Amino acid sequence: MKSPSYPVLIVTLLTIVSSMITPGSGTETEQIQKDSEKLNFSKPNNLTQNDDDSVYPQISSSSDNIYIVWQESVGSYGTTNYDIFFKKSNDDGNSFGSPINLSDNVGFSEHPQITSIGNHIYVVWVDDSSGQREIMFSKSLDNGETFSNSIVVSENSLGPYHAELATEGQNVYIVWNSFGTETSNIILLAKSNDEGKTFGELIEIGEGDTETYPKIAANANEYYITWDRRDHKDTEILLSKGHKDYNNIQNVTQIEKLNNEDVDGGESQIAADANHVLVTWTSNVPIDKKYVYVSSSMNNGNEFGDNIPISSTNSSNVENVLIDNNSYIVWQDNIDGNHDIFYTKGNTNGISIDKPINVSNNIGISECPSIAVSTSAIHMIWEDDTTGNHEVLYKRLGKMA
């Protein structure tokens, strides 16, 4: 997601367990809350403050500029139509400007994703204004002052959904799920090497049927894609990588399974920085132990280390960022019986993964988190219904905390 990057996290399960209290215990929850109070988090900032619903927020950063997109109900109260909105901060999250409606159409616009590099911002979402679902793309080349008219990047793709994107240099990569004519669920990739002015022919990723939740990250000349594939009763986390100058990802590298045989897969996230690649996911089973797992590579995704569990109980919606020799991870969990947003930080050599911190810690349902790291701070947003409707809440944490 949203957007945005490791030596292998070689840590034994025994080491992690010894540094964390057993998942789900009341003692752990109390400790998480105490640790959260010690850190220099800003107070939660309601960025939407409306009468209806603002959902599925995503965040990106470039230098000290913070960019946020979300899906918001428009029209009269209680309507089911949504548009995609954008808001930015030019002072590292201390203040935000007025929202801009990026889609502003009669159709249903949903699930936005955002990425940025320099003053360039790229946004995709799913839209049905034409009478059929399509992946729409818009960009800003002036730090969000203006945006281009949206264009369709999913030509001849049936029923697209779960769109994700990444950028590196002048390259823009977009992946999504699509219902194919011969298979029920495939993954497609659209590539641009001219800052999104044009996109090449669509490339099919993976091996065909039952493949979902594609995620993508890019670094230098390479891009990395992870996705889920249901194999009988289990879910596999698969990864492949491509080169910006190649048109067929299968000619670049073999597909690799990342989760161990005794670890189930689930919706994943991927980040890349230098020669480090980080993949996180939340397991689908068992129901009462849906942990967050981490696996990382120190050689450009050619080999990955063990699956490392993070202390959690019923996790979902994990996101991560990889930058400056550190990993930053957020996810949704109900460790203490209520859905809250949790955060942790790890280093590239796997010596330590910090104790999870309850970031939202309120009486409402907090879900769908997103994270970005700027020059001097860590920025987190999520969807929250504490006020009685769904709003987008934002918190900032000093990077050295």
Image (cartoon, helix red, strand yellow):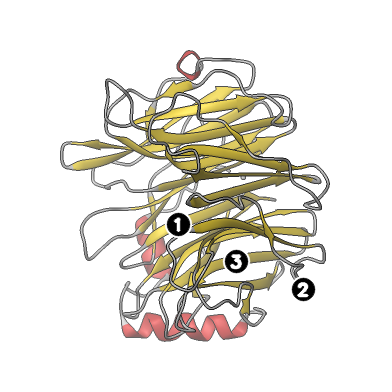
The amino acid at mark 2 is Asn
193 displayed left or right of 14? right
Provide residue 256's location: percent of width, then percent of height.
39, 29
The amino acid at mark 1 is Val
> Badge 2 is on which residue?
94
Provide residue 59's location: percent of width, then percent of height.
62, 57
Are there few (<14), some (14-19), or many (20+) residues within 10 Å of tag 2?
few
227 displayed left or right of 235? right
How far is mark 3 from mark 2, CA to CA?
13 Å
- Could you tell me which secondary element the residue under label 1 belongs to? strand
273 displayed left or right of 350? right
At a point 37% along the width and 75% down the height, the residue shown is: 21
Are there few (<14), some (14-19), or many (20+) residues within 10 Å of tag 3?
many
Q: Viewer-proximal residue, 391 or 315?
A: 391
Q: Nearer the viewer, mark 1 or mark 2?
A: 2
- Which label sits on residue 380? 3
> Badge 1 is on which residue?
318
Provide residue 210's location: percent of width, then percent of height.
27, 33
Q: Quadrant of the C terminus?
A: bottom right
Q: Earlier in the sequence, mark 3 or mark 2?
A: 2
Q: Is residue 48 above or below residue 298?
A: below
The amino acid at mark 3 is Met
At a point 60% along the width and 77% down the height, the residue shown is: 49
Q: Is residue 78 above or below residue 123?
A: below
Question: Is residue 276 visible to us here?
Answer: no
Are there few (<14), some (14-19), or many (20+) residues within 10 Å of tag 1?
many
Q: Earlier in the sequence, mark 1 or mark 2?
A: 2
